[in-house]
Amino acid sequence: MRVDGDGGRAIVAGFSARIPADGLTAMVGPSGAGKTTLLRLLNRLDDADGGEVLFDGRDVRSYDVIALRKRVQYVGQEPVTFPGTVADNVNAGAGTDALLGRVGLDPALATRAADRLSVGEAQRMCLARALALNPECLLLDEPTSALDAGSKGGIEALVRSLADNGLTVVMVTHDRRQAEELADRMLVVPAGGADGDSAGGSRPASVQKRRYVRRSRTLDGDSAGGGGGGARS
Amino acid sequence: MTDLSGRISIGDVGLSLLLVLVAVVVSRARKADLERDIVIATFRSFAQLLAVGFVLDYVFDGNAALTPVVLAVMVATATLTSGARGRRVPGAHGIALASVTAATAGTLGVLLALRIVPAVPRAAIPLGSMIISNAMNVASLVMTRLRDDLASHRREVEARLSLGQTAAEASQDWHRAALRSGTLPIIDQTKVVGLVALPGAMTGMLLAGASPTSAIRLQLVVMYMLLGGNAFAALVAGHLTVRRLFTPHHQLIRSLSRNA
């Protein structure tokens, strides 16, 4: 697959990978390798310039884009709050309290102005906002990079539990330790994803099994909420 | 009644250049470095208005059929100006053309169709020029404001998109702000008209010797026409700009999603 950048340089070129639909996949690699771009392709904030991105076996471009984004939620690096209260942001009506509880926020925060939250709280709120749409797959772009050490551990535990509860999670991180401790497998995006090899040469990315399985869990590809996440070029 | 029209000779115009000289002297004394611009502006205004004077004399004098041509030249100039101003929006010239044309057709067309103003060059050309120049500014303002706002808030826009909002939904706050910034100036002008400044059309009629009440009636028509025209221009420019800043698949275009 290929994504062109400005001035004719490719951001991602000749990349191919398959992400299983179960558990938590960490996408690691040096900065500039195109990890964020790959996540953006999966819910179509951007489109590949060559090759294809498949979700559940079908080209992402064959889905209705709005419906696809609701199934495949993307949460960015720094929490983005919308004007209004936390409840306005989460936008889940009667389900707001339960969602806040699920992401470890005090339901009493529902009436607080969203821009008054700490960064860690705001990141949890963003996760609640994504979960409100009941997605099958959650794409997380460096979800802890904006956080201090204390909030970091909390978000990591939350992400792990979401994956344990059947959500397909793909998490970009530059932190190898975080990937090894948290994820079920690692997808290594090689440096020089921008190597200009736009001919479509396929260089398979390596997927490494976690060395230490934290608990035994097996999930079939399709048991995660009825859908499977797969990205392949 | 004192009528100033026809009383100003070329020599009088020359004398009024003394006032420009004052501006040049002030600029030089204060090192404002505006002398060059002042001189260029003075020469341009002289040449342009002289040319327009001859053209209008010709059109008014039995060549009314050329009125649409004069208006078309004005629309074309406004399109080039506004399109250049909004050049960071893809297709800015097309947006400017649609915006200015809609404003002109939607207001001047109505005034002519309802016979509020007579379909003669002496009415259509000056009124048209006011609508066109106003619409040009509104189109530039709406395009640049919307583009800059979406660029600087692209993370929020994309967060909204990724939550499954459409491009229209994700951009509506800034779309609204751009429409407001495009139409508020004329609304404010309409509110304070006569209290702060006597507007151009009325001033012109008074100088030409008309009675204040008839000058006011014309000015009211002009104000309402500009209010309507600017609203048309803002609506069309806003709508088309949103369409150009997103792909049909509800994605921000790359020049916005990758750079501020």
Image (cartoon, rainbow, N blue to C red):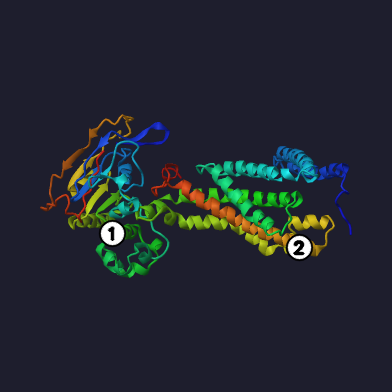
Is residue A103 or residue B223 the one in the foreground? Answer: B223
In this view of the protein, can residue B209 be seen by the observer?
yes
> Please, is residue B219 above or below residue B20 in the view?
below
Give the percent coordinates (x, y) of residue A143: 30, 51
Q: Are marks 2 and 1 in contact (CB under 8 Å)?
A: no
Number of disc labels: 2
How crowded pointer 2 is (Cα within 10 Å; few <14, some 14-19, many 20+) is rated as: many
Chain identity of mark 1: A
Amino acid found under the numbered disc labelled 1: Leu
Give the percent coordinates (x, y) of residue A131: 28, 59
- The residue sitting at 35% across, 34% down in the picture is A10
Give the percent coordinates (x, y) of residue A230: 23, 45
- The residue sitting at 68% across, 57% down in the picture is B111
Q: Is residue B96 left or right of residue B45?
A: left
Is residue A5 or residue B253 the one in the foreground? Answer: B253
Is residue B119 or residue B225 the one in the foreground? Answer: B119
- The residue sitting at 26% across, 66% down in the picture is A101
Could you give the CA–CA distance between mark 2 and mark 1, rounded to whole angstroms?
61 Å
- Is label 2 or label 1 in front? 2
Q: Determine which residue is flagged by label 2.
A: B216
Dot 2 lies on which element?
helix
Give the percent coordinates (x, y) of residue B31: 71, 41
Q: Determine which residue is flagged by label 1.
A: A131
How crowded pointer 1 is (Cα within 10 Å; few <14, some 14-19, many 20+) is rated as: many
Dot 1 lies on which element?
helix
Amino acid found under the numbered disc labelled 2: Ile
- The residue sitting at 86% across, 53% down in the picture is B4
In this view of the protein, can residue A147 be seen by the observer?
no
Q: Quadrant of residue A13?
A: top left
Chain identity of mark 2: B
